[in-house]
Image (tube, grey):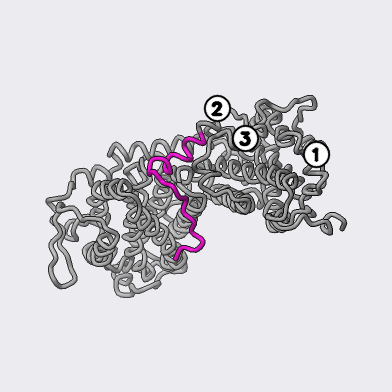
Amino acid sequence: MAATDADLGAPDELTERERDAVEAQLFRLADDEYIQAERYTFWQVRAPTLESDLAVANNAQDELGHARLWYDAIQQFGYSEESLLWESEPDDFQHSTLVELPFSEGDWGDAILRGYLYDVAEEIRLAALEESTYREIRERTSRIQGEEDYHVEHAENWLRRMADDEEASRRVQAALDRLYPYALTLFEPVGDIEEDIVDLGIRDATLEEMREEWEERITAFLMDLGFEVPDDAEPATPTGRDNEHTQHWHDLHEEMVSSYRNLGRHEATKLMDDE
Amino acid sequence: MNIEEVKQQAGPREFSPRDDLPREYREAATRMLEFHANSEIMGAYLERPFIRKAPSLERKMAFSAKTQDEIGHGQMLYRAAESLGIKTRDEMLADLANGDGKFLNCFHYPMERYVETPMIAFFVDGAAMRRQATLKSSSWEPYAHAMDKICFEEGMHVKHGESILRELMSGSKKEQEMTQEAFEEWWPRILQFFGPTDDQSTHHDFAEQVGLKTKSNDELRNAFLNTYMPKAEKYGLEIPDEPRIRDNGDGTYEVVEDDLDWEEFFTVSKNEYEGSKQQIDSRARAQEAVQWVRDMLDGQATTGDGPTPQAAD
């Protein structure tokens, strides 16, 4: 394939333009996965059954593992986990606002639907990265893809069940109406750099193309189950991609860094080489 | 089988659902298993805030994984309890939510600070390991079998807790002081983990006679102290002067019981302590909020009209 033949090379071989574009792609991958995982963990020891508790924990840990892979790739450009995650400010992050919204207590319909909307988008994005000209992205993508397939299947099974139940389908529909504009922010640009990402072959589909594919896919599936998918929605603001976030993210971020700050830490523990 | 025959035959993994066991045995085994399973759930509930508050990405992953393991242990133990035919899992979980279900004393104290986490993850889990290892020889085979997997995973949890403790105690002076303070707060509760001395324990005699448990509270407490007092000191923790612990010089210790607050312990064990209510009620509210999901699953299981009966979990 042409795309893989044109390899951008190792992290230290990139031109400034290439590096900026690679970083722009990596940051949204890492931040989306990291915060989606964080919100999933809300359901640990709070899910409807022990079985669903185990499943949601699996998803959270998969996403955390992916976030770690992407942050590791970012760290090859000289960043550290400390600066990225623990000594950061909320507006250093570029995740979509979809993943930062808190769950209302008991709103399992939101949890499942959000997972579905996110994971389908993630599948489409990963497919567009399979043949990335940047090897560090290409290789990580193939490691991650298998798990994302399972996440979509898991969400689809739940949605089929909930579509069959009056109260559950009402809750899912309410979540769909509320979340849809936020889900669209997944396809919002971070800036002019978007064109470079595609021109340089880092990703081989534009945001518009991915959004179109996503809308087609989720609309077909959800309408088939009897849900109404908004057809004239605009992306919510702020989008997150532009480093602007809802207050929910500021609150969540503060909680996430609280121990690191209270302990006066300067280092985030790595366990891989421990013992 | 009558109770005398059970006592005569009692041995490691001797009894299974194939045996016709007297109600007294099945009730005692259910009580132990339910307590153990409830403790897994409430232990996980106690630690869950630190998934969010862990101070590194890999610590966060470890907290999430540990919490998940505990839920898995609860699931296995409830299954082993159900197999005794006394109580269903739903009944046990309902009792846990409404405040009738009992669980370990240490899980009645909500944790506020990260420095408290090794008190559970190292000391309490270490103490639990002692007890659990002996349960691999329990006479109720499903219990012993569940312990094979659980003990393996608990071993990993204790390492996780030890790693956190070692890191805190080799960190800044501030970290060390905060950790010592947490240790002093938790140490009496940890000593009470094994319950009162054997002459005060009500269920013990019968459980030992029928082989459900193989070691007494005192033996377990001694074994724990022999291992964990040196470990605490190795990491630079100072053992508080009180409660007094007398070294008998023969590998055994005597904890001066009057130095411990047994009134608090028995309040805790009746779920009437302030922290008990906080933990039980907030978990119960979270469970109540997703009752509609369980109703949906139950309805679809009963009518068999769920679209994919096996797939959604």
The chain holding disc 3 is A
Q: Earlier in the sequence, mark 1 or mark 3?
A: 3
Q: Is residue B133 left or right of residue B197?
A: right
Residue range corresponding to the magenta coloring: A252-275
Chain for disc number 2? A
Residue drawn at x 39%, y 36% is: B281
How many neighbours does mark 3 have within 10 angstroms: few (below 14), some (14-19), or many (20 or more)?
many
x, y percent for residue B50: 44, 45
Write down the quadrant of residue A175 in the picture: top right
Q: Residue at x 57, y 39 (%)?
A: B295
Q: Amino acid at mark 2?
A: Gln
Task: Please tell me whether mark 3 sits on a helix, a strand or a loop.
Answer: helix
Q: Which residue is mark 1?
A: A195
Provide the residue designation for mark 3: A110
Do marks 2 and 1 share a subunit? yes
Residue for badge 2: A247
Instruction: Please tell me which residue lies in front, A40 or B310.
Output: A40
Circle 1 residues within 10 Å: few <14, some 14–19, many ≥20: few
Q: Earlier in the sequence, mark 2 or mark 1?
A: 1
- In which quadrant of the rendered image does the N terminus of chain A lie? bottom right
Q: Which kind of residue does numbered mark 3 sit on?
A: Asp
Q: Position of residue A158 (x, y in %)?
A: 66, 43
Residue B28, how many percent across, how many down? 33, 58
| Residue type beneath disc 1 | Glu
- In percent of the image, x 39 and y 66: which residue is there? B140
Label 3 near label 1: C-beta < 8 Å?
A: no
Tell me where residue A25 appears, x and y as whole percent: 71, 44
Calculate the distance from the C-alpha at mark 1 to the C-alpha at mark 3.
33 Å
Q: CA distance from mark 3 to mark 2?
A: 19 Å
Marks 2 and 1, Cα distance to the nearest angstrom?
30 Å
Which of disc 2 and disc 3 is earlier in sequence?
Answer: 3
